[in-house]
Image (cartoon, coloured by chain):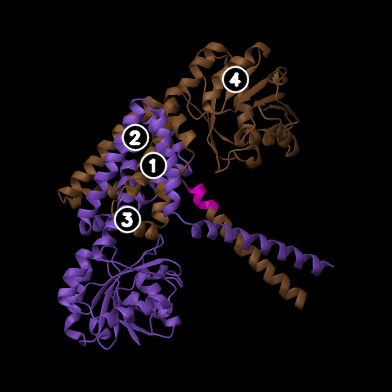
Chain colours: A purple, B brown
């Protein structure tokens, strides 16, 4: 099977590397000739050009552009597509992409590989980025089931954990665990910067440590991505934000009223509930690194000892 | 100089280990005999008992109990103290501790070593926990300057970065960067748990990844510590929470009004401003681990190659 990738950034490039390692032929398209050359050089594609027509003969096309370029890219692609070509995207919001795209192209299946790093470009593309990471597909009723099956198999081949749901369920879920945290975390940074006493603000900056670093991390992320997710997932995000405000208000009320029993019960439940969202793999990865490090060290010592002996 | 440590948990134990490595004699007191024995065994103290009188002959006493035990512990200590004995604490809130304690004991200097791990007990005590970490002292006008100097030197001896400020400045600073994040992060977890559609809540739990893990980390922490910091730093925390609400409201207004330019500018500034609070050491530590790991690996390969050759 031939796979086309339009948009050769971190996600497009990393998908390409993995697809090629599973013997798919991968043809890439980027607006930048330099990106095409890099993609060829690092083995993310078999070949790449700046011309959309280049992916016309592929069986499955991944649109890996930023959210606001997905619909225009599909529109430009359509003249070159064969009726059987399956098109998918990797956008982090689904309903506002999937319905317009499905009207343009029946064989469109929305997708969202939930893997990312701090990097963005083709130079950051890496192998096995999607292994054990969620990959959501959001097929709607009008899509031929066999197209979904083909895409499912390709997603599974790169080791991702496949989830199937409606575009709406996807959007509400990511509003909770991905988009709400960005706005909350950004508000935290803004609030800390609003301290009017410069000495105290400076002291806060000096005293901030891992707790602040963690809580503020996603609020210090890419502003363009933040705006796009708010734009494309506005309704679900606002819904989550209002729920957040209500819960925050309750905690503030308890603190004001010195209702420490209530506050304690709330913090007891958040400690318990967090584990429903944050599973072991991340922890395991950390432990894994330590184990590898320790083993390497002992093997090293052993080798030194035996070469001396 | 002889140092007394009352309360042999993570902080008390780790202080003891470092003080002893700098040739101070360290005498410990814990309510639990088992803890005393462990502290002696791991080298956190020269000797320890369950009797407060045991530290009577020391020159400098660190009260390392939980926040709500600091004032009662000082009250119980006073009958045994010589007038020259300096007493300090390690509580994470200062004004509500320092003023009552200074009235009880003129030679009291508030302190806050800002180092911690997930652990809490003597078993988690470790060497060099305070190296390059902030250690705040909050002397007030009534304290003999020479007492502060002595404590400053001891704090510097364990490699901590010393900061001097008023108890109020400390409390407002930690409200921003330590206590506000706990409440915000807890509200995030509560909000995500409030999703009434069980399928969507389950999907959120499956899709949550590093962004959610980071933002929710401190909200999933120790409930008792969370309640104590709210109790003892109520005023500064409420002030920070109200500022946070205002900034959150502004972002929500922009999202509602589809004022994407404003939202983009806000996220641009939070990206920039975060770097004022989050400095390089943490990043360096991660890089450092990778460098050590890579070097170990190459050394290992080299040794294997030379033992084969």
Question: Going by the image, does A265 lie left or right of A7?
Answer: right
In what quadrant of the picture does the N terminus of chain A appear?
bottom left
Q: Residues within 10 Å of mark 1 (few under 14, many from 20)?
A: many
Identify the residue at image location x=19%, y=79%.
Answer: A106
Q: Chain of mark 4?
A: B
Label 3 vs label 4, nearer the camera = 3
Name which quarter of the figure residue B71 lies in.
top right
Give the secondary structure at mark 4.
helix
Question: Going by the image, does A75 lie left or right of A201?
Answer: left
Give the secondary structure at mark 2.
helix
Q: Are marks 3 and 1 on the same chain?
A: yes
- Residue B45 is situated, as x and y percent measured from the top left of the image, at 72, 32
- Residue A72 is situated, as x and y percent measured from the top left of the image, at 18, 72
| Mark closer to the chain start, 1 or 4 | 4
- Residue A86 is situated, as x and y percent measured from the top left of the image, at 26, 81
Q: Which residue has dot 3 on it?
A: B198
Report the disc number at residue A251: 2
| Real-space Cα separation, disc 3 to disc 4, in angstroms | 48 Å
Name which quarter of the figure residue B253 lies in.
top left
Report the disc number at residue B186: 1
Q: Which residue has dot 4 on it?
A: B73
Q: Chain of mark 1?
A: B
Question: Going by the image, does A67 lie left or right of A159?
Answer: left
* Whether label 2 touches label 1, CB < 8 Å: yes
* Whether label 1 touches label 4, CB < 8 Å: no
| Real-space Cα separation, disc 2 to disc 3, in angstroms | 24 Å
Give the secondary structure at mark 3.
helix
Q: Chain of mark 3?
A: B
């Amino acid at each position: 099977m031939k796979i086309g990738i339009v948009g050769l950034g971190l996600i497009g490039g990393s998908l390409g590397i993995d697809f090629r390692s599973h013997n798919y032929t991968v043809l890439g398209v980027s607006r930048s000739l330099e990106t095409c050359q890099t993609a060829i050089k690092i083995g993310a594609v078999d070949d790449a050009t700046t011309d959309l027509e280049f992916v016309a003969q592929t069986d499955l096309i991944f649109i890996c552009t930023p959210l606001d370029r997905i619909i225009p890219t599909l529109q430009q692609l359509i003249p070159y597509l064969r009726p059987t070509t399956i098109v998918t995207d990797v956008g982090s919001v689904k309903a506002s992409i999937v319905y317009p795209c499905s009207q343009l192209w029946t064989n469109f299946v929305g997708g969202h590989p939930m893997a990312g790093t701090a990097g963005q470009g083709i130079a950051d593309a890496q192998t096995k980025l999607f292994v054990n990471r969620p990959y959501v597909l959001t097929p709607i009723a009008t899509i031929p089931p066999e197209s979904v099956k083909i895409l499912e198999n390709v997603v599974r081949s790169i080791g991702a954990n496949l989830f199937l749901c409606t575009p709406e369920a996807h959007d509400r879920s990511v509003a909770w665990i991905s988009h709400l945290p960005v706005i909350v975390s950004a508000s935290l940074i803004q609030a800390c910067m609003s301290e009017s006493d410069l000495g105290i603000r400076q002291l806060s900056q000096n005293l901030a440590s891992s707790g602040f670093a963690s809580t503020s991390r996603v609020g210090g992320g890419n502003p363009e991505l933040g705006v796009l997710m708010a734009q494309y997932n506005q309704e679900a995000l606002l819904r989550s934000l209002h729920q957040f405000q209500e819960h925050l208000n309750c905690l503030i009320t308890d603190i004001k009223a010195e209702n420490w029993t209530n506050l304690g019960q709330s913090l007891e439940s958040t400690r318990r509930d967090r584990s429903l969202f944050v599973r072991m793999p991340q922890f395991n990865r950390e432990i894994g690194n330590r184990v590898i490090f320790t083993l390497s060290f002992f093997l090293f010592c052993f080798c030194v000892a035996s070469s001396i002996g």
